[in-house]
Image (cartoon, rainbow, N blue to C red):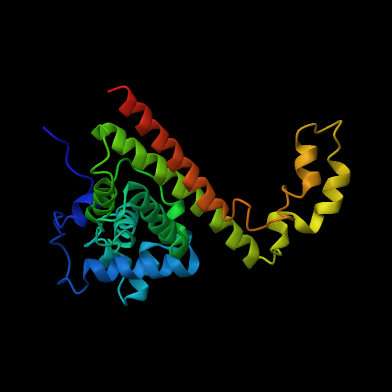
Amino acid sequence: MDKQLPNGIALSWGLGKPSSRGPKREMSLKQIVDTAVSIADKDGLAAVSMNRVAKSLGFTAMSLYRYIPSKDDLIILMQDAISDLSIPLEKAEHGWREAMEAFVQATIDVYKEHPWFLETPIYGVPMTPNALKVVDWALGGLQHVPLEDSEKMAVILLLSSYARACGILQKDMARAMQLGSPPDAFSGKGYADTLASLVTPERFPYLHSVVASGAYTDENQSSEDAGDDIEFGLKRILDGIEQYLKKKKEQT
């Protein structure tokens, strides 16, 4: 027999049983979750507390516990709420690569809009309805790809991990800029000459030529360069998957 679903997951499916204690319920689960998301968007995940959410709604923290048993459960509901994406209609002319690119970009966009999402713990495989809808969307993009179900899930995990890594990088860069760090600090352009003098071929035999060429600090970008790092990385991952598919086809 299956274990009982955790409270937060059960609530996301509408399966949770509200407490019968206390006065008549005057809030909705959606109001509570939306308020918590707004607080996190504005001030970060650390600012979200049962007390602050309740106060924002004009209630006491004890009133909130009649709807949601704990802050951990609230975070699960917040995660699911921002996973309610507008799934694009499937287009016949689009292949699996385009579908996976759209999936990764949509995931990165969620992290960009809600940076606090990256601070939430990963409890396991997605189990809330909106999160599963996103998984279903990704699987739809792979429906005609000759992979086993386990391989398709591995592809989704790989791409999700890449999107998360990109989200973390963008979050850290945005935070640094908020604190006054200049854009050149990310590329290192402002320190190119100093780096060139410090990174000697004797001490850094392989890095030296990269720094000297300007590639390390993006000094010589042109239309022939790889371009956007995130897009470049994603395309190379998809190239690898494509090669795997070709190899698998040759073996059948």
Tell me where residue 66 sits by quadrant.
bottom left
Question: Residue 157 location in percent, x, y?
Answer: 37, 40
In the displayed orientation, state which residue is furthest to the right: 197
Q: Quadrant of the C terminus?
A: top left
Q: Residue at x 29, y 57 (%)?
A: 80
Number of numbered discs on residues: 0
Q: Is residue 122 left or right of residue 193?
A: left
Question: Residue 243 location in percent, x, y?
Answer: 42, 33
Q: Quadrant of the N terminus?
A: top left
In the displayed orientation, state which residue is furthest to the bottom: 58
Q: Residue at x 49, y 54 (%)?
A: 167
Q: Does residue 122 sit above or below 28 in this rendering?
A: above
Tell me where residue 16 sits by quadrant.
bottom left
The residue nearer to you, when weighing 39 against 198, is 198
Q: Residue at x 41, y 40 (%)?
A: 158
Question: Residue 222 location in percent, x, y?
Answer: 67, 57
Q: Does residue 170 sit above or below 97 in this rendering?
A: below
In the displayed orientation, state which residue is furthest to the top: 251
The residue nearer to you, when weighing 9 against 54, is 9
Q: Is residue 125 left or right of residue 164?
A: left
Q: Does residue 62 sit above or below 127 in this rendering?
A: below
Question: Residue 219 location in percent, x, y?
Answer: 74, 56
Tell me where residue 48 sits by quadrant.
bottom left
